[in-house]
Amino acid sequence: MSDDDKRLAAEAAVEEVRDGMLVGLGTGSTAAHAITAIGRRAAEGLRIRAVATSLASAEQARGLGIEVLDFASVAAVDLTIDGADEIDRHLLAVKGAGGAMLREKAVAAASARMIVIADGSKRVERIGSAKLPVEVLPFARASVLARLGALFDSVERRDGGDYRTDNGNLVADCTGWRGADPQALAVMLQAIPAVVGHGLFLDEVDAAYIAANGVVTRLERGDASG
Ligand code: 5RP
């Protein structure tokens, strides 16, 4: 994993930001590089407004002079740039190591285009090795964890149960999908009422910029065959 590669991927993606756009700002160390690059372009005169997928990203962006709107009042976003924990050639991704997957998915779903940025360590043949974060309503903790236990080999409450998302919910980090394919797993997770979000991004990602050893590769949805 290289911070230079994260920055290169982020800067390549930020080239897609155009004057007048409403931009979705992702969360995490790679997205932070994108916010820095957008801030730099804004300081040079690019007129953009933004929505943020986490309180931390909103704070970083405002600190750079970027206007950050309340997403509650935004119907559509032009372009979102965000990190990922795993991404494959079909642009299926796992997100949420930073705990922001619910807001990230809401912003991605409202976006005309969503770009993942990552260093080469995130590129995988097939998603499913990284921990899959599941956001859980604390009210229903025990019953949801029991149901997740039937779907995964291991279910760990993040920070021993002390972790809370920006939405006030807890996160279960789940490993070992027991052979479920991602689409089937997403359906099963969504069928648990007090699961309020999860890190499977199966339809949202339109493109990815992945940097490895200083070389940036762009993947577009539909490019991969087979
Ligand atoms: C946060 C995320 C992040 O985008 C993802 O975890 C990648 O983070 P990083 O760029 O720090 O490796 O999904 O919820």
Image (spheres, rainbow, N blue to C red):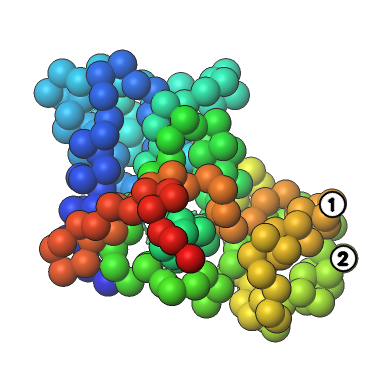
Determine the residue positioned at 55% across, 31% down: 110
For residue 77, which numbered disc appears in the image? none
Determine the residue positioned at 33% across, 33% down: 61
Q: Secondary structure at mark 2?
A: helix
x and y percentages locating residue 156 in the rendered image: 66, 75
Determine the residue positioned at 25% across, 19% down: 19
x and y percentages locating residue 130 in the rendered image: 51, 73
Q: Nearer the viewer, residue 148 or 92?
A: 92
Give the quadrant of the N terminus.
bottom left
The nearer-to-camera label among 2 and 1 is: 1
Q: Are marks 2 and 1 in contact (CB under 8 Å)?
A: no
Q: Is residue 196 visible?
A: yes
x and y percentages locating residue 99 in the rendered image: 54, 55
For residue 193, which numbered disc appears in the image? 1
Q: Of the residues shown, which amino acid type is indicated by label 1?
A: Pro
Q: Is residue 166 visible?
A: no
Determine the residue positioned at 41% across, 72% down: 124
x and y percentages locating residue 139 in the rendered image: 83, 53
Q: Nearer the viewer, residue 74 or 205?
A: 205
Does 142 appear above or below 83? below
Q: Residues within 10 Å of mark 2 (few under 14, many from 20)?
A: few
Q: Residue 30 lies in what quarter of the image?
A: bottom left
Quarter for ligand 1?
A: bottom left
Does 206 appear above or below 29? above
Q: Secondary structure at mark 1?
A: loop
Residue beneath label 2, please?
Answer: 143
